[in-house]
C-alpha cells in the first residue's frame, strides 16, 4: 500500500494491532510521557473511522523485522469553525537512532497522500512554540502559519 | 512587525549567497539586485563574516561566499546578529508598565513576541529557499 525504501531499510505501512505496544514505547521514548490510554483510543478509532490514519515506518532489517522506527498519526476533520476538510497530524515520532535519514519526511508524505485521498486539500498540525525540533521539521516540509489561531484558557 | 534596515540587508545578502554556495558575489552586485546602499551592505557583510556566515574572497574578482550550513542556520540566527527582537530582557521599561493595564498590555506584547521568535527560529535558510521554490512552482 505504501512505498518501500530499501536504501534506509524501511517500509511504510498502516499500523496493525500488534504495533500498539511498540508505538507506546517509541512515543514514550520520544516525548518523555507515556500515554497508554491515548494510543489505545487511537487504535480503536482506526477501526471505526476511515479518515483516521496511523502509519508506521517498519524495519526491513532481517535481524529486527518487527522493529518500528517511526510513526505518524492523524485524520481528516471538517467544519470545525468553518474549516473545510483538512488533514490533521496529531503526532509524529522517529526513533532517535534513526533520525536524519528522511524517515520523518517519508511518513509526512505518506499521511499527506492518505488525507488527500480522503478529500483533504491541506494538512494542519499544532506545535508548542518552544518545540523547535518539530516546528523546524514541519516548516521544512513546507508548512506555514495557517488561517486559524489556537487560543486557550487555564481552567485552574 | 518591521525589521531594522541592517537586519533586512543581512537577510537579503545571506539568502542570496546561500542560494548558490559555490557562487561569489560582490557587495555592489547584491546591492544592485535589491536596490539598496552598497556602503551600508558592505558593513552588514562584514558583520555576517564575523559571525561565520559568509567568507570574504580578497583580490580582483573578489566578493563574498556563503560559508555556513543552510540547513542549520535559522532566520533568527541572522536577525540576532543585528538586533534583539522580542526578548523581554531587551525591552525597556516604559512608563505605565507597572499598572494593571500596563501589565495586561505587556502580556499581549509578550505573546506576539514569542510567536515571532518561534517563527523566525524554526525557519532555516534552506527551508526558506525551498519554500520560495515551492511557491514559484505553484504559481
Image (cartoon, rainbow, N blue to C red):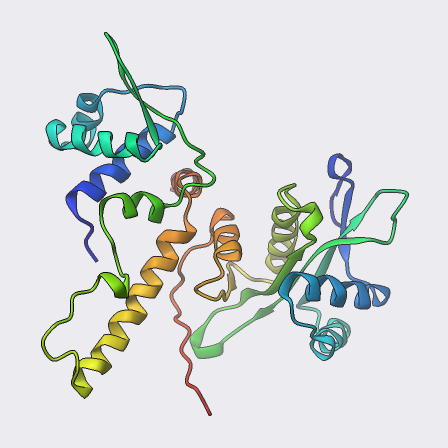
Q: Quadrant of residue B70?
A: top left
Tell me where residue B84 appears, x and y as whole percent: 25, 53
Q: Is residue B31 above or below residue A6?
A: above
Outermost residue on the right side: it is: A63
Tell me where residue A42 appears, x and y as whole percent: 71, 73
Q: Is residue A59 above or below residue B97?
A: above
Q: Nearer the viewer, residue A51 or A109?
A: A109
Tell me where residue B103 appears, x and y as whole percent: 22, 81
Outermost residue on the top side: it is: B60
Q: Nearer the viewer, residue A75 or A119?
A: A75
Q: Nearer the viewer, residue A134 or B44?
A: B44
Residue at point 24% right, 34% down? B47
Outermost residue on the bottom side: it is: A156
Residue at point 41% right, 31% down? B68
Residue at point 17% right, 82% down? B98
Q: Quadrant of residue B39?
A: top left
Tell me where residue A155 appears, x and y as whole percent: 46, 91
Q: Is residue B20 above or below residue A16?
A: above
Q: Is residue A79 left or right of residue B97?
A: right
Amino acid at each position: 500500500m505504501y512505498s518501500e525504501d530499501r536504501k534506509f531499510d524501511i517500509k511504510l505501512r498502516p499500523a496493525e494491532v500488534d504495533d500498539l505496544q511498540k508505538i507506546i514505547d517509541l512515543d514514550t521514548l520520544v516525548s518523555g510521557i507515556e500515554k497508554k490510554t491515548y494510543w489505545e483510543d487511537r487504535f480503536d478509532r482506526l477501526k471505526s473511522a476511515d479518515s483516521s490514519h496511523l502509519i508506521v515506518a517498519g524495519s526491513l532489517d532481517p535481524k529486527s523485522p518487527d522493529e518500528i522506527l517511526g510513526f505518524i498519526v492523524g485524520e481528516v476533520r471538517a467544519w470545525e469553525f468553518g474549516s473545510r476538510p483538512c488533514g490533521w497530524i496529531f503526532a509524529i515520532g522517529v526513533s532517535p537512532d534513526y533520525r536524519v535519514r528522511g524517515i520523518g519526511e517519508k511518513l509526512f508524505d505518506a499521511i499527506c497522500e492518505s488525507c488527500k485521498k480522503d478529500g483533504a486539500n491541506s494538512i494542519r498540525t499544532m506545535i508548542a512554540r518552544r518545540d523547535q525540533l518539530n516546528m523546524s521539521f514541519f516548516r521544512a516540509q513546507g508548512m506555514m502559519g495557517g488561517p486559524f489561531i489556537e487560543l486557550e484558557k487555564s481552567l485552574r | 512587525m518591521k525589521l531594522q534596515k541592517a537586519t533586512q540587508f543581512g537577510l537579503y545578502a545571506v539568502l542570496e549567497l546561500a542560494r548558490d554556495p559555490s557562487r561569489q558575489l560582490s557587495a555592489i552586485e547584491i546591492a544592485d539586485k535589491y536596490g539598496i546602499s552598497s556602503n551600508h551592505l558592505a558593513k552588514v557583510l562584514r558583520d555576517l563574516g564575523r559571525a561565520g556566515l559568509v567568507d570574504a574572497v580578497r583580490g580582483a574578482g573578489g566578493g563574498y561566499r556563503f560559508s555556513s550550513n543552510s540547513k542549520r542556520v535559522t532566520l533568527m540566527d541572522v536577525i540576532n546578529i543585528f538586533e534583539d527582537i522580542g526578548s523581554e530582557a531587551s525591552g525597556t521599561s516604559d512608563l505605565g508598565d507597572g499598572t494593571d493595564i500596563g501589565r495586561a498590555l505587556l502580556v499581549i506584547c509578550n505573546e506576539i513576541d514569542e510567536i515571532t521568535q518561534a517563527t523566525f527560529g524554526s525557519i532555516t535558510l534552506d527551508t526558506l529557499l525551498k519554500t520560495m521554490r515551492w511557491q514559484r512552482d505553484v504559481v
